[in-house]
Amino acid sequence: MPREFARLYEVSMSDELYDEHILDHFESPYHKGHLDHPTIAHEDKNPLCGDEVHLELLVDENRRVKEAWFDGHGCAISQAAASILTHEIEGKTIDELKEFTAPHMLDLLKVRLTASRQKCGLLGFKILKTMIYTLDERKPTVSP
Amino acid sequence: MTATLTTTGYDVEAIRRDFPILAKPLPNGASLVYLDNGATAQKPGLVIEKMVECLENYTANVHRGIHALGDRVTTELEAAREKVRQFIGAAEAEEIIFTSGTTMSINLVANAWGRKFLQAGDELLLNEMEHHANLVPWQQIAHECGATLRFIPLTADGRLDLSALDDVLTDRTKLVAVTGLSNVLGTVNPIGEIAARAKARGALVLVDGAQSVPHSITNVRSPDIDFLGFSGHKLYGPTGIGVLYGKRKLLEKMDPFLCGGNMIRRVQKMSSDFAEIPSKFEAGTLPITEAIGLGAAIDYVQSVGLAAIAGHEDSLMRQAYRQLSEIPGLTIVGPAPDFRGGIVSFTVEGVHPHDMAELLDRKGVAVRAGHHCTMPLHDWLKVNSTTRASFAAYNTPAEVDALCDAIHYARKVFRLA
C-alpha cells in the first residue's frame, strides 16, 4: 500500500479539530462550577492524558434534569465536551437521556475525533451514563 | 560533557536516506518530522531487509531443527546475541538474555532475583524519575517479600540528589534500580558514582537502559553494573525484542521466571532440571526474526557510530532547549543541557499537552504527550502531563525549527498569540 502513509496524514492534517465551537466552550464554558445540593454527582478521569471531569445533576421529582454543572481540567476536547454536554442535557428526563448515544454526543462536538481523542470527547458522556445507571438503581421501591 | 559538541562530518541527509519512512511525503509535500523517538525509533532499510531475508529464507525454530534452515537461523540468532554482547561490553554472550523488551527484562530480575533473595527488612533503592516499568515490578515484589522501597531525592531541577544518597543507601539496601536517562526530564544519571557507592554498601545495581542505550555508549563493566535492560525498538530495531544483561554469577543463582520449552535440561513427571544460561531464562520460542533484526540494528548504529549519533543528538537538544525557552508561556522540565540527553519535555501555559500534540501532528510534527508512564514524576513536577520531543540519529536542525513553528501555530489556534 504505497499510499498508506500519506492517507494517514490526509485525515490527521485536516485543520477542523479546534474550530470555534470547541474553543468557545473551552474558554467560556457553560455551567462550570458546582451545585449546592446536587441530586447526584460523579467523576472520572482519562488516564491517558489525565483529563478529569466532575459532573453534578439536579434532578426533579419527575426525573427531569433541572440543572447540570461540571468541573474539571484537562485538554480542550474533554472540557469543551463536558460544557456542551451540560447544555444539551438540561431539561431532558432521565428516560430521554437513556436514548442519548455516544455517536449523538460526538455529533454535538461538530468535529471529527480520532479514536484516541474520542475518549476525551466522551469522558463527560461516560460519567452521565454511569449516573443514569446509579439513579435507576436508587429508584425508590414502591411501598406495599 | 563538553559545552557544545560539533557535528562536523555527520551527514544527516545520508542517514535520513537510510530510513524509508522519511522519504514519504506528507499531503502538504513536506516530510515527516518525527520527534517521538523516546517512544520508538523509526527503522532503517537495513533492519527491515534483514527481517525480510530471515522470513523469506530461513524461517525455522532455533536450537531445535537439525535441518539446514534450523541451523542457519540458530547461527543468525547467536550472531545477534554476540553483537549485543559487544555493543554493551559484556564479558560473555551467555550473559545476554533475549526478552520482549525492557519491561520484561526488569520483571525478570524482580521475579527471578527478588523473589529468591529479598527478605523482610531488605530495602530497594529507587527514585521518582523512574518509568513505571522500573517501579511497579519492585512495588509488587517488595510487597510480596516484605522489603521496603526507598527513594533517592531529586534536586529542584530534576537530577538525583547524590548529596542525600547516604541517607537512603544503607547496609539494608539490596539493589539500586536506576534509569540511565530519564524518559521525561532527559536527565543523564551518574551511573558510575551510583554504582561505586552502591557496591561499597554491598548492593547490586540495575540500570534501565531503555533510553540511554540507544543514545550513549554503554559498557556494563565500566561502570560495574549487575543488570541492564533495554529494548530493540528504541534502537532502530523491531518491537517485541529486548535484552537483559546480567552477570553470570547472578544469573546462575537465580531461579527461572517463565517455565516451559527450551529452558530445561531434563524434565521428569514431578520435577525438572534447568538449562544453563541464557536458555534458563528464554522459555518458549523467542522472537527470532526480531532478535536477528536487533542484530542488524546494532550493525547499523555501529556503522554510523554511536558517539557521532550522541554528539548530533546533543547539538539538536541544545538547539531545542534554546529555541523552546524563547516561546512565551513555555516551561521546560528537567535540568540544563549539560545534564541531559536528547529529550526535551515541556508545558505551554493555556494549551494542554494533548491538544498541543494534536496540533503539532497537524503540522506533521510527531511528539508524545501525557504522563509518559511516569506518574510519580508528574506528581513531583505538579503537572498532570507534559509534551515531549525526543531526538534520534536522523533528526535535523530544521526539524527543531519546525517544532517551534508548530508550537507558535498551536498558541495561535488557542488564541494566545
Image: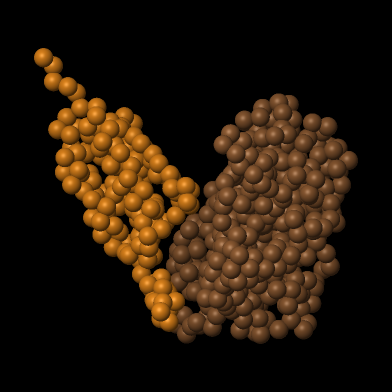
Nearer the observer, B319 or B248: B248
Q: In which image quadrant can residue A68 be found?
A: top left
Q: Position of residue B176 (x, y in %)?
A: 75, 42
- Against B6, is B197 above or below? above
In the image: residue A94, left or right of residue B156: left
Nearer the observer, B46 or B205: B46
- Against A35, is B65 above or below? below
Which residue is painted at 28% across and 42% down in the image?
A129
Q: Position of residue B63 (x, y in %)?
A: 63, 60
In the image: residue B191, left or right of residue B316: right
* Residue B408 visible: no
Q: In which image quadrant can residue B328 be found?
A: bottom right
| Visual hue assigned to chain A | orange
Q: Position of residue B192 (x, y in %)?
A: 84, 52
Q: Residue furthest left?
A: A144
Q: Position of residue B1 (x, y in %)?
A: 83, 64
Which residue is painted at 29% across and 37% down in the image?
A131
In the image: residue B397, left or right of residue B352: right
Q: How many marks?
A: 0
In the image: residue A89, left or right of residue B82: left
* Residue B283 visible: yes
Which residue is painted at 72% across and 56% down in the image?
B96
Nearer the observer, B177 or B31: B177
Quarter in which the N terminus of chain A is drawn: bottom left
Q: Can you tell which chain is drawn brown? A: B
- Image coloring type: by chain
Nearer the observer, A75 or B72: B72
Q: Residue furthest right?
A: B200
Quarter in which the C terminus of chain A is drawn: top left
